Image (spheres, grey):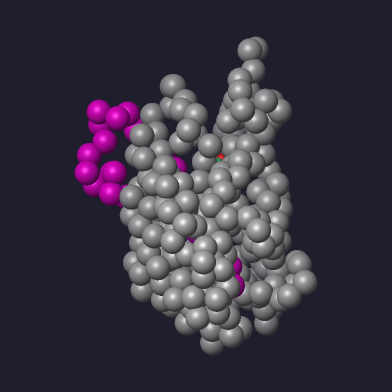
Amino acid sequence: MKKQTIIVTGASSGIGKEIARHFLKNGDNVVINSTTAHKLEQVYQELGAGENLAMVAGNVKDKSTGERLLATAIERFGTADVLINNAGIFETKPFLEVDEAYLDRFLDTNLKGTYFTTQAILPQMLKQHDGVVINIGTPLVNHALGGVPITAQMASKGAIHALTIQLAAEFGKDNIRVNTVAPGTIRTPMHGDSADNSAGLHLLNRVGEVEEVAEMVYTVAKSDFITGAIINVDGGIAAGHNLN
Ligand SMILES: NC(=O)c1ccc[n+]([C@@H]2O[C@H](COP(=O)([O-])OP(=O)(O)OC[C@H]3O[C@@H](n4cnc5c(N)ncnc54)[C@H](OP(=O)(O)O)[C@@H]3O)[C@@H](O)[C@H]2O)c1
């Protein structure tokens, strides 16, 4: 398979780190990002600090981070083939207690991060007449959950799903594919040690593992006829419920 350059945001932890590992293992070049430089440096070392790996610390809400990611990809590897907008935050807060600053944090990282990082990388993909953007969403935007106050999270993630299909429509003729992979509950540091409490939400009665998301992201990246798709890797959350 052709060696490609993959940019992964939020790659110092959880799903993003495993996505980076998966592409590296399969022979691609990878540029990793996250906000916290020392955490990113640790993961850079953990992933082998090899010639096929580069890193750029920075907040994805700033378009300049996307621009630095692109500059690094081009300088080190010559192309920018796949962008994975994975950086994201998750917290709970009752709707009536959410203030503007709190909502802005979610819109900044989840929505603006995806929006402006894509805006920074896309011109290179247009130049190449080839490129793939994969966003990380959630099936919960179409399958709401009582008892967990996540309106800020869902409003920002729902916007990512909408952005995905609109970008797919606007840039399909330029051979740029845009998709969202929507995981169920995945065992990552985002959930501390409480991930398994959500097992019963899934028809499979278990939570997912980071490798299961990375495999799908890899498949979508390498499959030339998938665009505008929201692909659930969710153990059946979106399909139905268990009556336990
Ligand atoms: N885990 C799940 O159950 C689940 C389910 C559905 C969707 N997702 C989505 O999957 C993605 C990854 O989640 P995860 O569970 O792997 O989370 P995680 O373990 O908490 O990792 C999040 C990563 O994003 C980075 N990050 C956060 N804000 C950032 C920003 N503004 N700019 C750049 N990097 C930033 C973090 O780095 P720093 O700490 O350095 O900022 C970290 O590397 C998120 O978009 C999340 O919403 C997760």
Closer to the camera in the image, 57 or 114: 114
| Residue 98 drawn in magenta | yes
Residue at 44%, 76% (x, y): give it.
Answer: 123
- Identify the residue at horizontal 44%, vertical 65% (top origin): 118
In the picture, the quarter occupied by the C terminus is top right
Give 128 or 110, whichever is nearer the viewer.
128
Which of the image's four quarters has the N terminus? Answer: bottom right
Please tell me whether residue 70 is drawn above or below residue 226 in the rendered image: below
The residue lying furthest to the top in this view is: 244
**Residue at left offset 38%, top offset 53%:** 111
Query: Where does the magenta region start and end?
Result: 81-105
**Residue 4 in picture, x, y percent from top left:** 66, 74
Give coordinates of residue 90: x percent, y percent.
44, 43
Q: Is residue 101 left or right of residue 138?
A: left
Residue in front for this viewpoint, 242 or 47: 242
In the foreground, 219 or 92? 219
